Structures are given as C-alpha cells and as structure tokens.
Amino acid sequence: MTRGALLSLAVALAAGCGSSKHAAACSLKASIGLQGATGSLLGGFRVANTGVRACRLGGFPRLELFRSDGKRVALTVHRGDPAFPSSRPVTVLRAGRSATAWIRWGSYCGSLWNRPFTFRLTLTTGQRVSARTNGAGKCQETGGAPRPGPGRAQVSLSGFH
C-alpha cells in the first residue's frame, strides 16, 4: 500500500468511514421487570438508547447478579429458553429505541424474595449496564422453612431482542 493510500485510509477511519459508526460506549438506560410464579421468575432486562447515536449492543451479554446486601449470587447461565418470546436479535440499537434481554430464574426462592436485586449486564463491547428490581414475586413453595437466600442461581438469558 502506498503512503497516500495509507493516509487516505487513516483519514477515512478517523472520520468514521470504513469503521464502526456505532459508539462502543453510549447512553443506555436500563430497567428490569420480573414476575414470579411457583418458585420461578420470568421477565426482561430492557435497555433504551437515550443518546443521539446508534449504540452497539453486540451479541450475547454477560450477566452478574447481586443481592440487596451487595453479595454476589453465584450464577449458572444458560443461553436461551423455550419460555422466551421469539423475535429478531438486536445487535445495534438506534437512538430512541429499546431492546430486551429475556431472563428466567428457575427454582428461585429464598428469604430475600422481597428485597431488591441488582442485575448487571456486560455487553460484548465491554460497556456495563445495571438495573435494580423493586423486589420480586413472592415464593410459592409448598412446605418447608424459608431458605437463606439466594447464594446460587440457575438463570436462562437471551441476547437482546
């Protein structure tokens, strides 16, 4: 490649041509909604692009979960679940739009059911977004004493849709 071609390529990349025109870190507002029944929670982690440029969400996010006392919940995360709505994946979120990563927390129950949890997703771009619950659906297990809880969780997660 000639010096002139390299200079043209560098100028094009600096101007955003030939490179991703979607910001790696952008203005995302997160919220989470979960509903419970028979010891499970189902819902979604919603992100809204509050900026003026498109945001890259990338592929499958990484999930972390924290109890109200700040302790991390040990997670086993499964990709996808038959209970999730099916729709087209969203990897780039235009300004003013939103997308949801679906979550199913199976066998959920514990003494902290009425306290908030913080769900934190790390996008494939490296950007982190967090949302805190307002509590969750009451556990409806039959019999037994309340369990301390939750220190471990089995969670199914989708990419953004």
Image (spheres, helix red, strand yellow):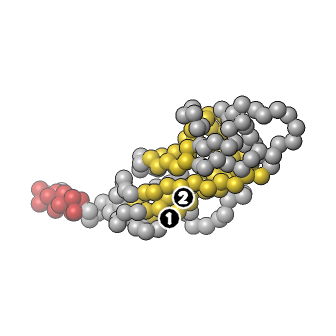
Label located before the other in sequence (1 or 2): 2
Mark 2 is on which residue type?
Answer: Arg
Whole-percent x and y of residue 47?
50, 58
User: Which residue is rendered at x = 47% and y = 49% of the image?
Assistant: 129
| Left or right relative to 33: residue 21 | left
**Total numbered badges shown on the rendered structure:** 2
**Looking at the image, is 127 positioned above or below residue 47?**
above
Query: Disc 1 designates what residue?
Result: 98
Q: Quadrant of residue 33?
A: bottom right
Query: Disc 2 designates what residue?
Result: 46
Do the numbered discs 1 and 2 sit on residues whose CB atoms are within 8 Å?
yes
Q: Callout 1: helix, strand or loop?
A: strand
Bin the neighbour count of mark 2 within 10 Å (Cα to Cα): few under 14, some 14-19, many 20 and up. Answer: many
User: Which residue is rendered at x = 11% and y = 60% of the image?
Assistant: 4
Q: Quadrant of residue 74?
A: top right
Q: Callout 2: helix, strand or loop?
A: strand
Q: Pick the quarter of the image with the N terminus.
A: bottom left
Q: Nearer the viewer, residue 58 or 41?
A: 41
Bin the neighbour count of mark 1 within 10 Å (Cα to Cα): few under 14, some 14-19, many 20 and up. Answer: some
**Looking at the image, is 22 positioned above or below residue 154?**
below
Measure the alpha-carbon separation of dots 1 and 2: 7 Å
User: Which residue is rendered at x = 50% and y = 64% of the image?
Assistant: 98
Whole-percent x and y of residue 8?
16, 62
Q: Nearer the viewer, residue 6 or 79?
A: 79
Mark 1 is on which residue type?
Answer: Ser
Whole-percent x and y of residue 109?
74, 40
